Amino acid sequence: MTMIRSILLVLLATFPLAAAQSGPGIGEPAPVFTLPDTRGETHALARYRGSWVVLEWTNYGCPFVKKHYRTGNIPSQQREWRGQGVVWLSIVSSSPGTQGYYGPAGLDSASVEMGSEATALLMDPEGTVGRAYEARTTPHMFVIDPDGVLVYMGGIDDVPTSRDEDLERATQLVDQALTQATAGNPVSVPTSRPYGCTVKYR
């Protein structure tokens, strides 16, 4: 039963990719947006032109997201890359009444509890920005260069499970992309299959 449940969980996590991609592509401009954070400040992507930017779609109620936070995998990457000047924006596109939607104060508290070290936690309850990027899962990651061009999109890593122990054999694809791109080298794996819970759009 446990094995069947695990298989079903992975299938559900990757099912959204069956739909045809219609969002932005690698080497194309990242869709511009303006969103509020949990503390009332407005963030426009254009504000960060000239900096490397990571977009992380998240849902603190999702077991896949919880894995990466409770192990410190995502917070450690946030901390490392922010220390090198990278802007890391976490985005919640869960609509009101669905998993992952807590309202500003609730999201702020959840972010602290999870140990997030993102630059900001942005709210997209209408799903406008999520749909513009074709964000399908939580987590779903995008790396944008200082010219506003996408250089990576996909999973945080390449092992699509919610088991903590699987991190040991995973390649951290966002970390790899940033390491290569910020050094002026081509990204060896510019796209990958995102996995996790489906984004809870309206």
Image (cartoon, helix red, strand yellow):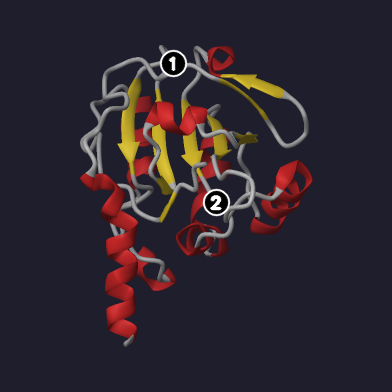
Secondary structure beneath label 2: loop
Q: Residue at x 31, y 27 (%)?
A: 23
- Label drawn at residue 146: 1
Name above or below for residue 157 compared with residue 150.
below
Q: Mark 2 is on which residue type?
A: Asn
Which residue reaches farthest bottom? 1
Q: CA distance from mark 2 to mark 1?
A: 27 Å
Which one is in front, 65 or 80? Answer: 65
Percent of width and height locating residue 48: 55, 17
Name above or below for residue 63 compared with residue 79.
below
Q: Residue 41's image quarter?
A: top right
Q: Mark 1 is on which residue type?
A: Pro
- Location of the N terminus (image quadrant): bottom left
Name above or below for residue 183 compared with residue 91.
above
Percent of width and height locating residue 90: 56, 39
- Label drawn at residue 59: 2
Secondary structure beneath label 1: loop
Is residue 183 in sight in this rendering?
no
